[in-house]
Amino acid sequence: MGNAQVDGNECTHVDVLIAGAGISGIGSAYHLQQQSPDKSYLILDMKDSFGGTWETHKYPGVRSDSDLYTFGYRFKPWVGAPIASADEILKYMGEVIDENGIDEHIRYGHKIVRCSWASDANAWTVEATRTSDGARLTYTCNFLWMCQGYYDHEKPYVPDWPGMDNYKGQFIHAQLWDPGIDYTGKRVLVIGSGATAATVIPAFAEKAEHVTMLQRSPTYFYCAENQNELADRLREVGIDEPTVHRCVRAQINHDHWVIQQRCLTEPDVVFEELKDMVRQYVGEEFEFEPHFIPKYRPWQQRLAFCPEGDVFKAAAEGKLSVYTDTLETFTEKGVRTASGDEIEADIVVACTGFNLSVMGGIPFEVDGKAVDWHDTVTYRGMMFTGVPNLVWVFGYFRASWTLRVDMLGDLVCKLLNHMDSLGAKRVEVALREEDKDMPILPWIEEENFNPNYLMRDIDKLPQRGNKPEWRHNQDYWSERDEIPATDLDGPEFLYDGERTKKALKTA
């Protein structure tokens, strides 16, 4: 890494700058080291440690809602139970960092505040604030790999509920949970019904006097033992862990593909099967009406994993009460619903989701012009028209996020190596002649995937076309074939403003 002078201040230059030391950033750094070993790089992260999501969330019971055989990296075998706690995931990530010397490339406590591209230098200038002392630091890089995620880690989504100032108890959003809060013997109200609610409710139920869940609409849950029979059997017969990891990963991905297809073709049958899984833990007499009958088809929003049916056990044992209603107002003692029920609570925990954050909310410029991401069109949810030498890692929701981290790691390194072979300093994507009449549409179809945080702020996201390469389709099972087969000399890729491509055509 070299140093240069920018506006009189010392500036560190690297070939590649990675934004974020979470699951995406650490995985991307590994692939860069392995597949493009001559590239210098740094990782900047605003936190004081690695982990991203798993460092942010500290609420009781925090765990993965994806299995670790596919949420874990392709290159690092997972050896524990499929559903893991945040501490176990952080331990796993720490091992990846230590085993591969990634720690020396990470700069913690560095918040990126501005990114600007200059075509005359074919470089990004990245300005960051060091949180320990407020110092403003400048970095330059040839390629920017955005791995900072998709939501605001500091400001979660809290609806503007009436009467919040009237409430005399303790209110907190799960994302901002303070581990010092003692809920022993307390009445806890959880507002929300998604994966976070499904995680905190069983943990609260262990020590709270009672837990109540207030939901606008129910969520689908997949209940099963927190184990993998294939993994256990392969280990029993002495198969090595890398092979166990590879086989179990393949099995889970296949099973997920089958269930996704069946959710489209026979959603009612799938729901009956999901209910049967619940009954294995709480008996045949469990009542699903009205609080556990979602209004949408399975997988139109994320299917929440429920190990050993713990949420339903809490309900069956009388530790959990459920209201399906809207919140009319807060009161001194709790909340009142639109139906007139008053729910008293000592602690109210909002599990109401995220605020979407596109590119970390960082201001971007290209040649002095501010980038409005909604004015761009996405190439496979990773690159954007008019923005050179940048990739955003946006993973899957129907499959494990990390599957796309590995896949895009391969493609980005292939792209960087291809640019070297061409002698190109710049790459960007552009609509082709054949795309000139293509409709330009919102980021994702509402009938395909419609969580509230996306629908609320979809106008902040880049747009898509109606062709596979111009959209992020959330379909790992098609992309696992399409992305590795990407033709980097295709007409959608422009190198050095087309100069390199034209030279090749005339060579």
Image (tube, rainbow, N blue to C red):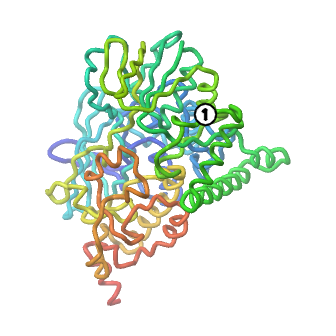
Dot 1 lies on which element? loop
Q: Is residue 436 above or below residue 227?
A: below
Q: Is residue 473 above or below residue 194?
A: below
At 41% across and 15% down in the image, what residue appears? 344
Residue 140 image position (x, y, % from top left): 28, 51
Work out whether residue 277 or residue 423 is closer to the camera in this orientation and state it.
277
At 72% across and 44% down in the image, what residue appears? 228
- Residue 93 in sight here: yes
Name which quarter of the figure residue 367 lies in: bottom left
**Left or right, residue 423 beside residue 273:** left
Residue 49 image position (x, y, % from top left): 44, 32
Name which quarter of the figure residue 383 lies in: bottom left
Q: In which quadrant will I find the C terminus?
A: bottom left
At 34% across and 87% down in the image, what residue appears? 505
Residue 52 image position (x, y, % from top left): 43, 38
Using a 10 Å C-alpha cutoff, classify the residue at mark 1 as few (fewer than 14 neighbours), some (14 to 19) or many (20 or more).
Answer: few
At 80% across and 50% down in the image, what residue appears? 239
**Residue lying at the far bottom of the rendered structure:** 506
Which amino acid, mark 1? Glu
Q: Which residue is mark 1?
A: 287
**Residue lying at the far front of the rendered structure:** 339
Residue 433 image position (x, y, % from top left): 28, 81
- Residue 94 in sight here: no
Work out whether residue 408 or residue 36 is closer to the camera in this orientation and state it.
408
Work out whether residue 97 or residue 198 is closer to the camera in this orientation and state it.
198
